[in-house]
Image (spheres, coloured by chain):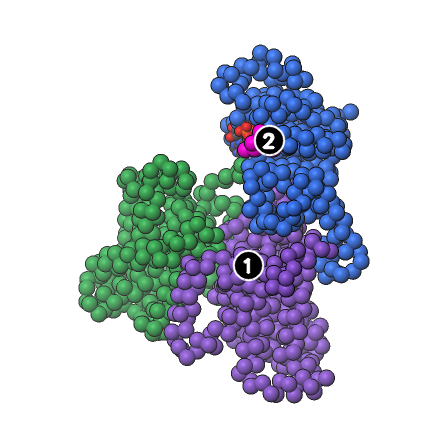
Chain colours: A blue, B purple, C green
Amino acid sequence: MSLLRMEDVSIRFGGLLAVYNVNLSVQPGEIHSLIGPNGAGKSTIFNLITGIYKPSEGHIYFDEKRIEGKKPYHIAALGIARTFQNIHLFNDLTVLDNVLIGAHTSGKWDLTGSLLKFTPWVRSDERKLKFLAMESLEAMELTDKTNELAKNLPYGEQRRLEIARALAVKPKLLLLDEPAAGMNPHEKQVLMEMVKIIRGKGITIFLVEHDMKFVMGISDQIAVLDYGVKIAEGLSEEIRTNPKVIEAYLGKGAVH
Amino acid sequence: MVEMMQNLIDQIDPYTLQILMNIGIAIIMALGLNLITGVTGQLSLGHAAFMSIGAFTSAILSIHYNLPFSLNLLVAGLTAAFIGALIGFPILRLTGDYLAIATLGFAEILKVIFLNLNITNKALGLSVPPPNTDIPMPFVIFFVALVTIIFMSFIHNSRFGRSLMAIREDEIAAEAMGINATRYKLQAFAVGSFLAGVGGGLYAHVIAYINPSDFGFMKSIDILNMVVLGGLGSIPGAILGASVLASAPEFLRFMQQYRMLVYGALLVFLMVFRPNGLLGGVNFTRLVLKIIGKNKPARAAK
Amino acid sequence: MLLQQLINGITLGSTYALIALGYTMVYGIIALINFAHGEIFMAGAFAGLFMVTVLKINIFLSLILSMVFCMIMGVVIERIAYRPLRKSSRLSALISAIGVSIFLSTLALMVFGADAKGFPDNTIPLIQIKLGPAEISSLQLLILGISAFLMMALEFIVRKTKIGKAMRATSQDYHTASLMGVNVNRVISVTFALGSSLAAAGGVLVGILYNSVSFNMGLMAGLKAFAAAVLGGIGSIPGAMFGGIFLGVAEVMGVAAGYSSYRDAIAFAILVLVLLIKPTGLFGQKIQKKV
Ligand SMILES: Nc1ncnc2c1ncn2[C@@H]1O[C@H](COP(=O)(O)OP(=O)(O)OP(=O)(O)O)[C@@H](O)[C@H]1O
Ligand SMILES: [Mg+2]
């Protein structure tokens, strides 16, 4: 039984079919990668899954429940967290606040909680969030940066903070949109290990990435998208030698 | 107790006391708007409208029903919050400048409605009887202002407050973290309106005469200036901004008619040289901790 | 009767449209609600009044000189109060604009006093022209004519001239335009100059129409014109023209229907309704944000 399943999903922006009839399923516990040339529709698929866009056609199932068209906050609460290709951190807040916000769905006290700030119930709620937040920061090795403002972190750490924030959501499925973009080879290596550890904790990972070494190094399954259409799917070796894939990349001269 | 307070007040000259009361009310108003605009990032150009709802509700209650003043203020605040939520529900879908314009539009409509209602005595306005309380007014105001400040600082360091800041910083990311932005914006709007309503009730009883025209666009702008001047999103900033702007007209009084001229020029000057407000970019927790010699913010130590 | 109200409404509305154009052009290019724009309208009215009554200049020449005066004023204001803030938050620029607005209206109060002033009776010879059951005055005709002429001139500048093309490019995409070698500073100055001169013309015409010029005439007129700009879809020039005329007609009709005490609320009620139903205005384009 798959954790995430897309059935004949399409989306149209004006005249552009950005994603066309895509069928995809992500099994629990795997690292599933989605690759494809620039503009293929990879980020659009993430936006469809997380409810930022609504598909023009087709259905998306998570845990066998239909989620297409649901609000993003609703989908996050169901257990899907994500990072963004063009970093979307809460820039003027501290690293700790960023992950505490990530832990939002695990807390329950709202406005009244602010009034009852020093009561045991609210404090234990806060402690729980704090614990989750620190745990996520540890996983991404950011504990010594807790009080920095997010915008003051170097680029590679901002990418890691995005992942830490998503981990704090306690997701079943983690969507990573080009997590290694802009990192140096060493940082990429470290990140790869971290992603493996995250998977080791039982979190399923759906990954978009241009760096082939990275993708080939950790993926269980790879799907390839070109002009919004899925052109191949399989294990690393199959993808590497698939003529359609080679054409999609080489045809445009976009080898990575 | 009450006598003690009265004695204390008798020792301060009435003019200073008046300024202090103005500052207290301004702080309540500014902190309410700061929650909406500074913390949640939703620009409102109609805050004075909610002040007028509170002011008229409170005045009418004082005229027709002899409620205890605390209850009177509570009803004034709740009425403003209720109408704030009612208006907020449709318009908080709008973002940025469109929201600002919609709040401005609603405020102008409300003003015109008040100018036409019998219960607000149309364009003549209402004379407000003294409040039904033994506690001297300045103390009531300081107390409410103090409670507001404490409550606001609670909000800033809570799950609720963080959600609001997340919406301000990046609404898309906030929703991706499970935050229902519309709901939180509405709550922030309601709390801000509640404070405006309470502030309006206090104002009505201090000034003893209110007119719908007192709560026009320029009043909303005055409150916004307090928040922006001090530094958006900062509680000490809003307090400073409110104190400076609520007392500035008095200090500038010697300039008489040049007063507003200087005020206008000062706003431009301040924005050009400190676009993030007087206290913008100053982190108070850190500043205080630096002064007392600790490096780790209190929150990390909990 | 209806025709008469329509004529009155369109006349009033065309002055709103003249002011609205300045809002819409500035917003289209630097995304600033220029709150001082209403005060430029007021300054234009006073400049015209001063030239007609004190310098005894012919009204048409006064109108042109007043437009030139406000043109300079608009450019100077942008230089002093907005340009240094171009990289700061939008709110800072908005507050700065409000500061300018307070400054200018207080200055006018000090220089010209609190009472409304009127143009001399013979500024424009009044002739009533029969139009079926309705009447149109020479003044109304003149206002309509001048407004139409100015709007066509603006349309020509924006569509056909080099600077107009640069303006359109900048309002499409500020950064790309500057990368493509458009002198963005110059475009912004020209935008302020054009917008301010139209507001000045609006000021002089309204001053004559109501025979009243006062230091606080800018606030309400500015807010309503802004409502007109939003109604038509902010950033859209035909939208501003339509919005202005629509609000003018609605307001006159509302007053004729007996809601004169709600006069100032009519424009805002329409504004709020439009925002709720179609937030980008009647002529604005919907842009879906890319993530
Ligand atoms: N909101 C939108 N409105 C219009 N077009 C869009 C929108 N979002 C995406 N597109 C278009 O859809 C196509 C796919 O975009 P998408 O961002 O999904 O590509 P991608 O595979 O993530 O590419 P990259 O590797 O560059 O990130 C592009 O042509 C893009 O311009
Ligand atoms: Mg992408």
> What's the mark number on residue B167?
none
Under circle 1, the secondary element is loop
> What's the mark number on residue B282?
1
- Residue tagged 2: A186
Residue placed most toward the observer, B117 or B160 = B160
Under circle 2, the secondary element is helix
Q: Chain of mark 1?
A: B
C258 to the left or right of A194: left
Residue placed most toward the observer, C116 or A179 = A179
Position of residue B260 measured from the top left corner of the image (x, y, whole percent): 41, 71
Q: Which SS does the magenta portion mostly show?
A: loop
Residue placed most toward the observer, A45 or B296 = B296
Q: Residue at x 63, y 29 (%)?
A: A189
Position of residue C112 measured from the top left corner of the image (x, y, whole percent): 31, 72
Which amino acid type is marked by label 1? Val
Residue C110 visible, this orientation: yes
Which amino acid type is marked by label 2? His
Span of residues in magenta: A177-187
